[in-house]
Amino acid sequence: MTGKPLVAVTGASSGIGAATARAFSAAGHPVLLMARRTDRMAALGLPDAHLAQVDVRDRAAIAQAVADAEAKFGPVDMMFANAGVAHLADISRQDPDEWDAMIDINCKGVMNTVHAVMGGMIARRRGTLVMMSSIAGRKVYPDHTVYCGTKFFVHAISESIRGYLAPHGVRVVVLSPGVIETEVLGGVTDPDTLAAYRANKAKMGGGIGADIVAALILNAYSLPQNALVQEIVITPTAQEY
């Protein structure tokens, strides 16, 4: 067992999840990495890491991964509920199966993730939940209809859970990024929406690196337990809206 507490990350195989796992590992934390692509997690080559093939729609799988990692490294002190999908499209043409995927992963998946660790944090009277939202959880964008709905959901439940956990000394941080260099466009099947997104991204000179976001999460976590950064909103300087 290492000296620093265990940190858990869903969606840890790429993007902000992988960057956050690297940042906390470099800071000396053991890490629980959860994602569907175990090869990508293994390729990170992090020490003191427990890798679990997890789909966040599977509540039991998350709970088992947490139990297995805690048996090795002690209690999860931070859970980053990061896994999500962005199926952006014209709402009248979009396949409703894409709505289902976003609701199941971005909403139910976040709740499944929180459920796996919240009871232990309450009992220990410490812990931090980092909830992946988006700038699209604060304002609406064209062709983001259901995606925005799922991210507004994350904001709403985070506000409620924060109030619920505050008397127990547990922190809730909402992360709301703008355009970041990640694989988010991989979930966009509507060609017009994809072209518009790419054009807007090019206009602002590209997104910012996931490592920048990870550093902010580490900084917020590293504050004393009685100090809380309630929300991190980060965008490229050139992102106009």
Image: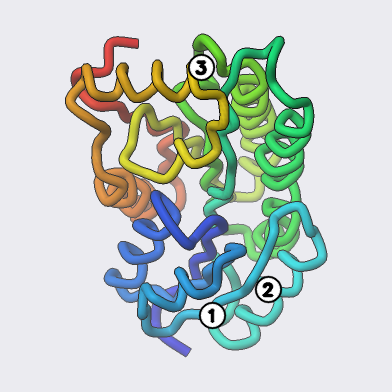
The three-letter amino acid code for the residue at tag 3 is Arg
Mark positioned earlier in the residue sequence (1 or 2):
1
Residue 68 locus on image (x, y percent): 67, 81
Q: Is 9 left or right of 46, judged from the image as shown?
A: right
Q: Are marks 1 and 2 in contact (CB under 8 Å)?
A: yes
Residue at image location 69% in from the left, 59% down from the top: 55
Which residue was labeled with disc 2?
65
Which residue was labeled with disc 3?
138
Q: Is residue 94 above or below residue 14?
A: above
Label 1 element class: strand
Label 2 element class: helix
Q: CA distance from mark 3 to mark 1?
A: 34 Å
Mark positioned earlier in the residue sequence (2 or 3):
2
Q: Is 223 left or right of 156, judged from the image as shown?
A: left
Closer to the camera in the image, 75 or 114: 114
The three-letter amino acid code for the residue at tag 1 is His
Residue 66 locus on image (x, y percent): 67, 71
Q: CA distance from mark 2 to mark 3?
A: 32 Å
Q: Is residue 200 above or below residue 158?
A: above
Which residue was labeled with disc 1?
50
Residue 83 locus on image (x, y percent): 57, 49
Residue 96 locus on image (x, y percent): 78, 26
Q: Are marks 2 and 3 in contact (CB under 8 Å)?
A: no
Residue at image location 60% in from the left, 73% down from the top: 75
- Answer few, some or many: residues within 10 Å of disc 1's Cα (few below 14, many 20 plus, some between 14 and 19): many
Mark positioned earlier in the residue sequence (3 or 1):
1
The three-letter amino acid code for the residue at tag 2 is Ala
- Answer few, some or many: residues within 10 Å of disc 3's Cα (few below 14, many 20 plus, some between 14 and 19): some
